[in-house]
Amino acid sequence: MSNPFYQKDILSIKDFSKSDLSLLFSTVNKIESLEFEERTKICREKVLANLFYEGSTRTKLSFETAMLHIGGNIIGFQDTKGTAIDKGETLSDTIKVVDGYSDAIILRHPTEGAARFAAEIAEKPLINGGSGSEEHPTQAMVDLYTIIAEKKEIDGLNIALVGDLKYGRTVYSLLYGLAKYSPNIFLVAPPQLKIRNEIHNDLDNKIKMVEIDDVESIIDKLDVMYVTRIQKERVPDPAEYEKVKGSYIIDNKLVENAKDSLMILHPLPRVGEIKSEIDNTKYAKYFEQAHNGKKLRASLLSLMLNEEAI
Ligand code: NCD
């Protein structure tokens, strides 16, 4: 099979098919089975540039460990402080310069469209590490991989997405990813944070989605519950945020009627929406999900930077 990721920009989950994703997921397991010598040859002498114009823990650190895992090197910044951006350098100039230092670039930016704009400037493949509320394609890849690794398939699963479904970029990308399969989706959000119309227009005919107000009424049916943080920094009005914060709290009482096999996922960071008492239950899979970020991103980088899939 030809490698659909080779030298490709990773801007949107929409650009990849179900069979592309299967290749990505099967490559994870192939890399993990390699001995150190073989594994660290995959990206030897390759350089990944991390350009983070917005805070990150998991995305940045998992891409870094992923690159080290396959023998590559990393440059970049986490904070524009101390860079020429603080002196007024444009995104376009920064990308042109970094393009000459690296083999692939990851950009996280608070503005929608920033990744697409940067990808047009960069000759090297560019990964969207999150652009405003728009997209976070590699998080969706991690989320889908985590579900498939545990459940073997996505078709037929009852999956609830809970929390901020309007401003959360991980939800947006995940829904388009899930639409490549046939799960039953429950969308649980306060009225102000329901999914954007664009998603209804694109996906209503492709995937079964039901909007509901509470998790309690469906908890016994769920195979996966994907919880999200209310995106305080993206809700335009602080008064609106005050109204919706704390709308959904996942605690031991809520999961009393859950299936034994329920998986609770969260892209993290959480800010109170999953109580820490859940962490020690069999349902908690969010730290495993974060750890899968390293393996999945190693697979992605290996496919982007080597024409022959492993
Ligand atoms: C998310 C993000 O940055 O969009 N975090 C992540 O990458 N895992 C989720 C969030 O900030 O709520």
Image: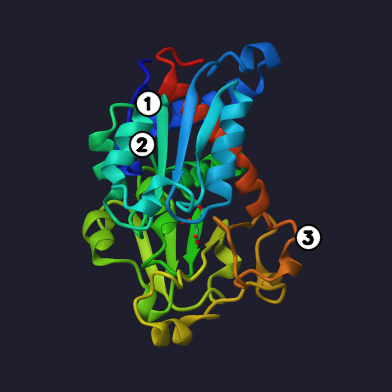
How crowded is the residue under tag 2: few (<14 C-alpha within 10 Å), some, or many (20+)?
Answer: many
Q: Is residue 264 visible?
A: yes
Type of amino acid under label 1 = Phe
> Mark 3 — residue?
280
Question: Which amino acid type corresponds to the residue marked 2 in the rendered image?
Answer: Ile
Q: With 228 as the anchor, is 101 left or right in this view?
A: left
Q: Which residue is at the far right?
A: 280
The residue nearer to you, when weighing 122 against 195, is 122
- Separation of marks 2 and 3 at Cα, in angstroms: 35 Å
Q: Secondary structure at mark 3?
A: loop
Q: Which residue: 26% across, 62% down? A: 200
- Assess whether mark 1 and mark 3 are in contact (beta carbons under 8 angstroms): no
- Callout 1: SS: loop
| Distance from the alpha carbon under mark 1 to that under mark 2 | 8 Å
Q: Are marks 1 and 2 in contact (CB under 8 Å)?
A: yes
Q: Secondary structure at mark 2?
A: loop
Q: Position of residue 84 (x, y in %)?
A: 39, 46
Ranked by sequence position, the earlier of labels 3 and 1 is 1
Ligand 1 closer than 8 Å to label 3 CB:
no
**Relative vertical location of residue 285 with respect to residue 235 in this rendering, above or below:** above
Residue 178 in view in this figure: no
* Cα distance in 3D space between marks 3 and 1: 37 Å
Q: Name above or below for residue 162 compared with residue 99.
A: below
Residue 217, horizontal then vertical, whole percent: 54, 76
Q: Are marks 2 and 3 in contact (CB under 8 Å)?
A: no
Mark 3 residue type: Asn
- Residue drawn at (37%, 80%), measured in percent from left and top? 191
Residue at mark 2: 10
**CA neighbours of label 3 inside 10 A, class few (<14), some (14 to 19), many (20+):** few
Left or right of 65 in this view: 43 = left
Say how many tags the image has.
Answer: 3
Which residue lies under the disc numbered 1?
A: 5
